[in-house]
Image (tube, rainbow, N blue to C red):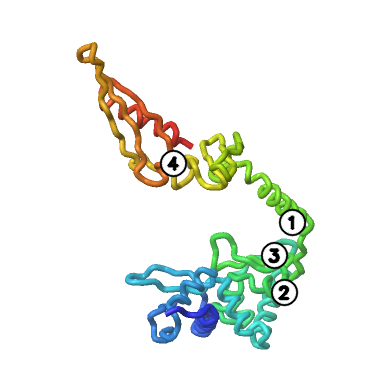
Amino acid sequence: MTIADTDRRNDAEKLLGALLEALGDDAIDLRLFDPDSPEFGGFLKTSWSELETSEFVASTPVPPGFVYRLTPTGWVEALVRRGFLDDEHIKDRLASLAAALKRKVKGRVVSAVVDLDTLARESRIPTGWIFNAVDSRLLNRVHRRRDAFWLGGGRGRLVVVPTDFGMTQIDLFEDIRSQNEQLREELAAVKDEISGYRCPHCSAELSSRNDIDLDEHTIGTVQSFECGYTTVDGCLESPCPSDPRFPTLEDFELRTTCNANPLIPNDQWWICSAVGKTPMAMKVRVPSASGRTDAEARERVIENYKRISKP
């Protein structure tokens, strides 16, 4: 049964809200959710994978299946979609947390470090909720202001409050990024223009372009590249060795024939040819080779294959 995209999207959004509600004030790194539990039985199984693809949840293998936890991005997304960021209770929490953090650097000229339990006690906000706010950089996301962050190696324990905490962030490199974006667009246009002069697999240069008579009424264009890639009117004639579809040695049948000189006793030699067994192998010409024995002729053809198949 095919499920409409709208229904899938709505189900995933409802599941995200249900996860937020089930989480409550717990820390996102401590709460695991089982898709097979009764509280999530009404949701599509695909909604879990779709939330994970959007990086709103992360899975952990627990045989015989997987359990999930909300990511910092998923927690904020759930708050936004449920309208909680406009809720006065959440606004009050955010203001109390900001005030508690600001007090830590008031009058200081260096950053301050505070443990999570102290923040919870002074702000009167549950420890788990503060963990989620710091982990997701909630103050920065909501107000675009300089936020607190975890001390290296101290996730969930120690919070660094920078001296410029709460200040509005400015984008020092906005003009440079704008110029870079313009350059990227110009570069993309140039790449499109020159793509017809390069092999699409290895970027080897175009070595020749000629018109040929396909039949008495049709003229075609043959393009050959230095790597051996060749097309006729855009259709593949000979593949590039860097093409993932380039045939392996097993795609060829090695056929040998014995030739003897009737005038000289015991004077004979072997010729080996590689005959393609697949449509792609039939487009590759492996030079034939001769030898004093069947094995020698085969070995020389194999060496020829290795030489032409080397990118």
**Amino acid at circle 4:** Lys
Q: Is residue 176 visible?
A: yes
Which class describes the residues within 10 Å of circle 1: few (<14), some (14-19), or many (20+)? few
Q: Give SS at disc 4.
A: helix
Q: Amino acid at mark 1?
A: Arg
The mark nearer the N terminus, 2 or 3, is 2
Residue for badge 1 = 177
**In the rendered structure, which disc, 2 or 1, sits on the residue that comes first in sequence?**
2
Residue under label 2:
143
- Left or right: 230 in relation to 284: right
Identity of the residue drawn at 32% across and 71% down: 64
Q: Position of residue 124 (x, y in %)?
A: 61, 83
Q: Nearer the viewer, mark 2 or mark 1?
A: 1
Residue 283 - label: 4
- In the rendered image, which residue does mark 3 sit on? 162
In the image shown, does 228 or 159 lie closer to the viewer? 228
Q: Which residue is outermost to the bottom?
A: 88
- Amino acid type at circle 3 is Pro
Q: Nearer the viewer, mark 4 or mark 3?
A: 4
Image position, residue 112 (x, y; %): 67, 65
Furthest residue to the front?
216
Q: Quadrant of residue 132?
A: bottom right
Secondary structure of the residue carrying tag 3 is loop
